[in-house]
């Protein structure tokens, strides 16, 4: 199933919600340090009892995450592009990369040689960003839908 990669997330509730997303869809969640205290009560509350049902891996660096995830296509989600997330035919091994909530992915990650393409989720003009967990949900469900919802009911 598709892999979600969070680069240095800042808000525990978003990561907790994405743990629920991973458990519900079979996606894997990979997280690049540094991040908040993984024992944070907001993280646990948002993830409810899904922590044991999800595959979650924490990596010490972006390079370490890529070492484990490649070879795969890596799609970086950013508002700084014109190509939409629906313009891609997703493969089960794809990696969906999202940046930290306040800033998004930094230029050095967006321009990294491992990035296959940069994608955006459309919004009405004048809006800066959407919630990280919501963006991950939109992208994961599109990838899963294209694959025929394997393992789903």
Image: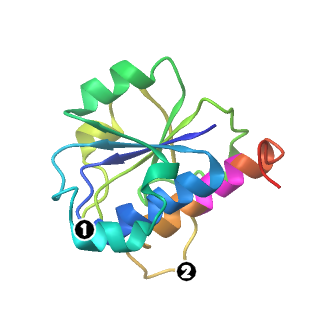
Residue at 52% of width from left, 50% of height from top?
A: 53
| Position in image of residue 18 (x %, y %) | 46, 60
**Residue in view at x 64 percent, y 52 percent:** 25
At a point 28% along the width and 58% down the height, the residue shown is 100
The N terminus lies in which quarter of the figure?
top right
- Is disc 1 surrounded by few (<14), some (14 to 19) or many (20+) residues within 10 Å? few
- Helix, strand or loop under label 2: loop
What stretch of residues is rendered in magenta? 138-143
Side of 87 where 2 appears, left or right:
left
Residue 148, position in %: x, y? 84, 45
Report the Cα–Cα distance between label 2 and label 1. 19 Å
**Closer to the N terminus: mark 2 or mark 1?**
1
**Mark on residue 124?**
2
Identify the element where label 1 is drawn.
loop
Left or right of 41, for residue 148: right
Residue marked by disc 1: 102
Quarter of the image where one finds residue 56:
top left
**Which quadrant of the view contains residue 11?**
bottom left
């Amino acid at each position: 199933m598709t892999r979600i990669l969070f680069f240095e997330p800042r808000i525990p509730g978003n990561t907790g919600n994405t743990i629920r997303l991973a458990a519900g869809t079979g996606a894997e969640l990979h997280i690049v340090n540094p991040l908040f205290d993984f024992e944070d009560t907001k993280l646990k509350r948002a993830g409810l009892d899904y922590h044991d049902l999800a595959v979650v891996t924490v990596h010490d660096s972006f390079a370490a995450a890529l070492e484990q995830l490649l070879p795969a296509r890596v799609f970086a989600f950013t508002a700084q592009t014109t190509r939409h997330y629906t313009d891609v035919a997703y493969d089960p091994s794809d990696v969906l990369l999202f940046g930290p909530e306040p800033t998004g992915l930094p230029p050095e990650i967006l321009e990294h040689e491992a990035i296959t393409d940069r994608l955006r989720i459309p919004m009405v003009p004048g809006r800066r960003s959407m919630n990280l967990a919501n963006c991950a949900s939109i992208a994961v469900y599109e990838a899963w839908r294209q694959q025929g919802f394997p393992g789903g009911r």
